[in-house]
Amino acid sequence: MKAILQDLSYAEMQDLAVSLGEKPFRARQLFEGLTQGKTISGISSISKALKEKLLETYEDCAISVQEKFLSADGTEKYLFRLADGNLIEGVLMKYKYGYTQCVSTQVGCRMGCTFCASTLNGLIRNLTAGEILSQILLVNALHKDDAVGQGKESRAVTNVVLMGSGEPLDNYDNVVKFLRNVTAKEGLGISARNISLSTCGIVPKMYELAKENIPLNLTVSLHATCDEDRKRTMPVAKAYKIEDILKACQHYFDVTGRRYYFEYTLIDGENCDEQHADALIKLLKGKPCHVNLIRLNEVKERHLKALGEKQAYRFLGRLEKGGLSATLRRQIGVDIGGACGQLRASYLKEQ
Ligand code: SAH
């Protein structure tokens, strides 16, 4: 595979233009074209000679739509094809305030969580910064008419969650580069406050992230109230204790002033009895955090069961009564391919 031009920051693109014997303003035309979701060959404001030079080193098309599924509730699920033929998934959720896009950070995943489909075939490779960004550029281009804002700044996607396949902190450098590029004012300029990064809790990387000065919403997948339970569903728990995850979250809060989030997937018979609710309250009460409950999306290869909706609301009620800030995530798009990684997994099987 050739390199991905969307990896470059604006400053790097200026250097590239100059190194190719072009005037610096060409970099702006190139950068704007890519930010609009165009391929290199599709940017009309640059010369054929420059395109040819670029195409010697860079992929023309970083990412394309392999398949798109539309849910009755408006949610869109994408199967994207990368330049090397690998497939990744993405979801676009439509809210009143704007569109939230869920992006992938790796092809597959090596974290091995027992409830998750992304990890079924292990990690294939990391995505580059530009491949993560290109998921958003492409989806924006497909929704030009839904853009909010004015002029050049008008875009459909206002919020981004790093909750597609992959563990973002297992692809740290590319993810941080992506975060810098997606928030840069010369590019999409999405506010870090509108970005959520979800991690299974790689503690040392959480400390590193706190140093980057990117005020995003840090979300940790907890899914258990003690290490012994957590080890059953999340192998990463063998490396990092809940206690140390909580310390890293507190440090993130101290450094950034941003409250943090926990994801807690309700798995019937595993983590959602009254005792679990009480243990969760004990663990998190008084901390500057919010708990997002998710009802398990059942993955057929995994044999785990979702908690019923009524019981899920009862669990939520107990947390709230115990003084936690919590919500049960509304399930959207369930009719179009369910949970994380299921679409790619079923597609791979068919092939
Ligand atoms: N690797 C990151 C991002 C993963 S996906 C992380 O672990 O946080 C985002 C969220 O979806 C995580 O909380 C993950 O645990 C959860 N998830 C994965 N598979 C799921 C499933 N089948 N049902 C419900 N939630 C799931």
Image (cartoon, rainbow, N blue to C red):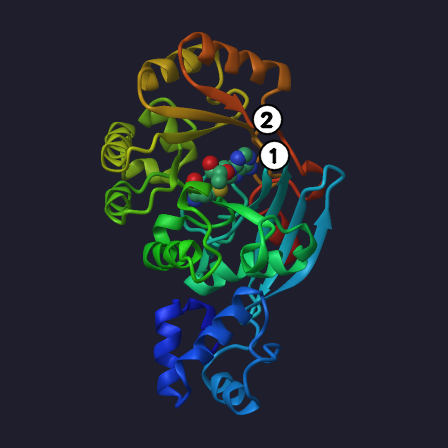
Residue 105 placed where, x, y %?
A: 45, 54
- On whether ligand 1 comes within 8 Å of the CB at mark 2, the answer is yes
- On whether ligand 1 comes within 8 Å of the CB at mark 1, the answer is yes
Residue at x-position 66% and y-position 57% = 144
Residue linked to disc 1? 298
Residue 329 placed where, x, y %?
A: 56, 28
Amino acid at pointer 1: Glu
Mark 1, secondary structure of its residue: loop
Taking the image as shown, residue 254 lies to the left or right of residue 50, namely left
Residue linked to disc 2? 306
Look at the image and tell me whether residue 29 can be seen: yes
Q: Please state which of residues 84 and 110 is positioned toward the viewer in this rendering.
A: 84
Look at the image and tell me whether residue 350 can be seen: no
The residue most toward the right is 72
Q: Are marks 1 and 2 in contact (CB under 8 Å)?
A: yes
Taking the image as shown, residue 336 lies to the left or right of residue 36, namely right
Above/below status of 259 relative to 148? above
- The quadrant of the rendering that contains the C terminus is bottom right
Residue 175 placed where, x, y %?
A: 38, 55
**Residue at mark 1 to residue at mark 2: CA–CA distance:** 6 Å
Q: How crowded is mark 1: few (under 14 residues within 10 Å), some or many (20 or more)?
A: some
Q: Please state which of residues 273 and 285 is positioned toward the viewer in this rendering.
A: 285
Label 1 or label 2, whichever comes before in sequence order: 1
Mark 2, secondary structure of its residue: loop
Above/below status of 67 relative to 11? above
Residue 17 placed where, x, y %?
A: 40, 82
Above/below status of 99 relative to 257? below
